[in-house]
Image (tube, coloured by chain):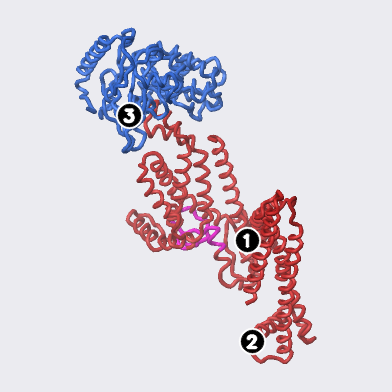
Chain colours: A red, B blue
Amino acid sequence: MTSFIVAALLLILLGLSYSQGYLGGRALAATGVRLHSRPRYHGILVAIWCLLPAILVLGAWALLGPGLMRAFVMSYLPPDVQELGPHQLNAAIRRVEAIASGYGVAGAMEPWETAAGVALRRMREFAFLVVIASAAGLGILGLLFARRRISPRLRARNSVEWLIRLLLLACSVVAVMTTLGIVVSLFNEAIQFFTFVHPFDFFFGTVWNPGFSTTGTAAIGQYGLLPLLWGTVMVAGIAMLVAVPIGLFTAIYLSQYASGRLRAVAKPVIEVLAGIPTIVYGFFALVTVGPYLSRVGSVLGIGINATSALTAGLVMGIMIIPFVSSLSDDIMRQVPRSLRDGSLGLGATPSETIRRVLLPAALPGIVGALLLAVSRAIGETMIVVLAAGNSPVLRFNPAEPVSTITVTIVNQLTGDSDFSGPQSLVAFALGLTLFMITLVLNMVALYIVRRFREQYE
Amino acid sequence: MTSSHPSDAQAVSASSSARDAALHDVGATKPVLANPLTEKDETVRSPDLETREYRLQARDVCVFYGEKQALFDVSLDVPEKAVTSLIGPSGCGKTTFLRCINRMNDTIEGCRVTGKITLDGEDIYDPSLDVVELRSRVGMVFQKPNPFPKSIYENVAYGPRIHGLARSRTEMDEIVEASLKRAGLWSEVKDRLRESGTGLSGGQQQRLCIARAIAVSPEVILMDEPCSALDPIATAVIEELIDELRAHYTIIIVTHSMQQAARVSQKTAFFHLGKLIEEGPTEVIMQTPRHKKTQDYITGRIG
């Protein structure tokens, strides 16, 4: 109900103010004066003047309201309740809020609770009315002010353009700030983790044995990153061994040999591979590929675990094929046709042309595409959770189970965990490590891709 | 009529020279200047003023892009060790015809060629013919300079390397030097052979592309508006170069500029809407065209 009223208020204000501004501008234009800005811009400017104060009031209430209401409830609480610890105090306040909202609470209601609840409800209704009224009032004031400003010389268009720029800037700031926020929080938690475990032991330790948080803080466990890092590298490496040749050759075929009709069909079909949810790949790896590999292994006389780096890497490689092939295909088609013609015109065969002219010319772009694929492989989680065997031991045989950074983060954060213990905090340190790896890879990739672009523009 | 039998190569060669003779006779029976302007549908042919060999001949060449026909029954003899220019308004098929001669049209999807083009009596569209070998004999220079993003040296060495023309490093060095010299670029780049070919100026890039084509010792060089992306000074340099190259190669050049055709070529063929309207010695085409359309084009009324 409340959100409906707010939406209705804003819509009414919008319609009213825009039409007022527009009509004002048009009335002025009708007198024959030459306006600096067209009536439309006057409408938009008046609407902004009207809506901005109203939105600011509503926003301020959304931010400050809960705190004010809490203070109000506090004043109704008996002194003995007020002196309780933070947890119990919160519980009491929540009870009162529930009574006020009419949801009802478990157990008998104390008289003071009922009284506080009723008072809170009245207070809420009153506050809402005040907020809506003031928002509407300020909006109307803004409207009137802006309406009076309309004159032939008012540079409404410039103001609107400026505000639009501001809006766009604000949106990009949101994206940047979110990234920064994530990095900062990762850093904070990771630093907290490093108060338990020395960074040296974390980054260079070879044993991963975090113990369980339930066994108490005495058993801190060992947090060596290397087994996980090695597992990650191995799985991603196997994935790239699968994806690079298949993806690259697919791209070469599609961009250089395939007829337009075949390409139009094949490319989307290959891209479907990228659209399959990774959990489905994981399932496929666990149920089909793993047992198959293990059977093949027993025929050949080598022990291959059904869940192993090999299984996960193989399936992940298939998942990454479209990344490699689609990006490389686009990049190879960006190489000017004139280069290809030049080589063919000298009597080079298509494959010589590809090897000696197209690939070297497209190489930077292809390397960029491959690095993007690697960072995708390193960050991949679901396939590895299901198919890599989750065994954080430093092993060099790809046919044995491994664990990766992503899988370990999942393990450390799922289930009952206390977020103040090293067992959970290590996830942030791992996340930070992963973030750094992919960040560096992406930066290198973007740098290379950009250099490639410059070459042909 | 698309193929000849390779075993008949000798015979075809013989018969084609017989055809040449016939063609000359036909020309000879029609005095050039006596003819008034015509608008007939067949190609108007004026005989060459001096007798030349014709090792490259096209007969009834039609080209289709999918359903659309781009060339209609083009027959043309290309004189040996001379420059032949193909002129005509945009979209008239001159580039299409040029690209038929080293089968570059093969690389365009949906392109179909009928008729016969013979080089030394061999049908170049014969299925048994090796396209790679053909293109090493018929080089091409494109409209826009397209050096590979490699060093100047590697650009020139590209062709010889593919065809295994050099047995040693010194031989390769010699080929590169000779080709660059012949293309008139050597003195400008001899101290920076290792620098990228894409760093040269437009005119230098085009001469590099000519050197690259020369390096595989072709017999014929096709040039597709080689100066259209260049300024007048670079154009003059290239035109001079073409004139020098004439001593060693058979050159066919597509050009938009009548002046260029007049300056560099000995024979001119005028195309219009996919048809070869008139062909003959450049002076004749430029000064006394016999077909109305040719005259309209020369005087700037069409195109």
Residue type at numbered disc 1: Phe
Which region of the structure is painted magenta? A386-409
Crowding at label 1, few (<14), some or many (≥20) Cα neighbours within 10 Å? many
Residue type at numbered disc 3: Leu
Residue wearing tag 2: A105
Q: Nearer the viewer, residue A124 or B299?
A: B299
Name the residue at the front extreme.
A31
Q: Is residue B58 visible?
A: no
Tally of numbered discs: 3
Q: Of label 1 and label 2, which has the lower sequence position?
A: 2
* Left or right: A234 as drawn, with respect to B25: right
Q: Nearer the viewer, residue A68 or A391?
A: A68
* In the image, residue A199 above or below residue B250: below
Q: Position of residue A88 (x, y in %)?
A: 71, 81
Residue wearing tag 1: A428
Crowding at label 2, few (<14), some or many (≥20) Cα neighbours within 10 Å? few
* In the image, residue B298 above or below residue A72: above
Residue wearing tag 3: B71
In which image quadrant can residue B130 be found? Answer: top left
The quadrant of the picture occupied by the N terminus of chain A is bottom right
* In the image, residue A86 above or below residue A290: below
* Left or right: B39 as drawn, with respect to A161: left
Q: Nearer the viewer, residue A395 or B249?
A: B249
Q: Chain of mark 3?
A: B
